Amino acid sequence: MAGKKVWVTWLPAGKEAPQPEGALKALTTVGLQVSGSLWIDDLEKMAWYDLGTTLQDPTQADLWLIAGRGEDFRSARYRYGLSLVTAMARDGRGTGFPILCLSLDTVPDAEAMPTLMRGLRFLSSADAGWAAKIAASFLKKGEGPTGDFRFSATGHPYIGQWFEVGPREGEWQGVMFGVSGEGKISHHLVGPKGQLPEKSVLEYATQGITAEVSGVEYTAWSVQNKLGQNDSYYIKVEGYPSKVMFGGHPGTDQAEVTILSLS
């Protein structure tokens, strides 16, 4: 536990908002190395990407702590950005990379969070021993959500917002990706995982597939390229879809889909 590095993301903003100094001191008191930054609410410039790359670096953090009030954890914009950072961290560090949340007032229902953040452990700052519990968490084997897919994101004002999906094991016989009404797909590529390709050859690409799942309408694109463990499907999305779906190509026996809520 000694020397473990905690990266703190502080969500509250504004003159009347709680300040992080007390929480940072509590963490250093229990022997943790603490770094961090204020949350930048700028989806338009994809500010979440810088935090995601920081957490992917093992030299920067052994644990990610998100601190905020109930209103912060209810913000759709915050939840969207935090979902994409979570996706990047889990993809880069493994599903066991520890992510904890510190509630500064009312502790929210963890199961009411977006899909990728469900099951995260919430601690309350009203508990005098919350920092010690974070220190003790390093003694436990980290566990995170698992699935047969990889999901990550890349974002930059010059290249746009891209989602990345691929199989964790085995092979996909084609793939489909769709977004809810708040988002729009504008491009797609296939290439090596973890590296957005400049161009690629797409097999039997389709656009504008519409489907309704649980009362939500999605617009999807697809390709029939075979994807292995080291391959990914990249989808450029304009806007901020509250939900995305992906799965096997509609014309195969792998046509089951996964739904992720992002906000």
Image (cartoon, helix red, strand yellow):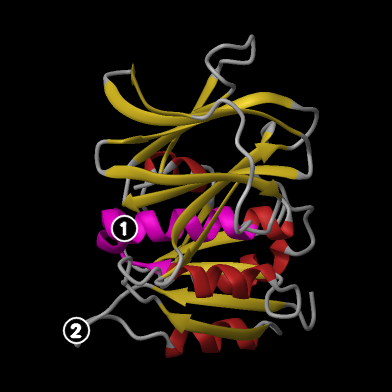
Q: Can residue 125 be spotted in the picture?
A: no
Q: Is residue 70 left or right of residue 201?
A: left
For label 2, the crowd category at 10 Å Cα-Cα, with few meaning under 14, some 14 to 19 and many 20 or more, is few
Toward the viewer: 18 or 165?
165
Residue located 67% across and 82% down the image = 30
Secondary structure at badge 2 equals loop
Identify the residue position indicated by label 2 in the image: 16
Mark toward the viewer: 2 or 1: 2
Frontmost residue, 239 versus 77: 239
Instruction: Find residue 3 and report its image quarter.
Output: bottom right
Q: Which mark is residue 250?
A: none
Amino acid, disc 2: Glu
Which circle marks residue 106 in the picture?
A: 1
State the extent of the magenta-drawn residues as a range.
Answer: 67-89
**Can residue 142 be seen by looking at this rendering?**
yes
Marks 2 and 1, Cα distance to the nearest angstrom? 17 Å
| Secondary structure character of the magenta stretch overall | helix
Task: Indicate which disc, 2 or 1, sits on the residue closer to the N terminus.
Answer: 2
Q: Nearer the viewer, residue 244 or 5?
A: 244
Q: How many labels, in total? A: 2
Q: Position of residue 87 (x, y in %)?
A: 56, 53
SS at mark 1 in the image: loop
- Horizontal arrangement in the rendering, residue 85 relative to residue 145 (left or right): left
Determine if the magenta segment contains residue 96: no
Q: Is residue 13 left or right of residue 97?
A: left
Is residue 231 shown above or below 97?
above
The x and y percentages for residue 241 are 32, 44
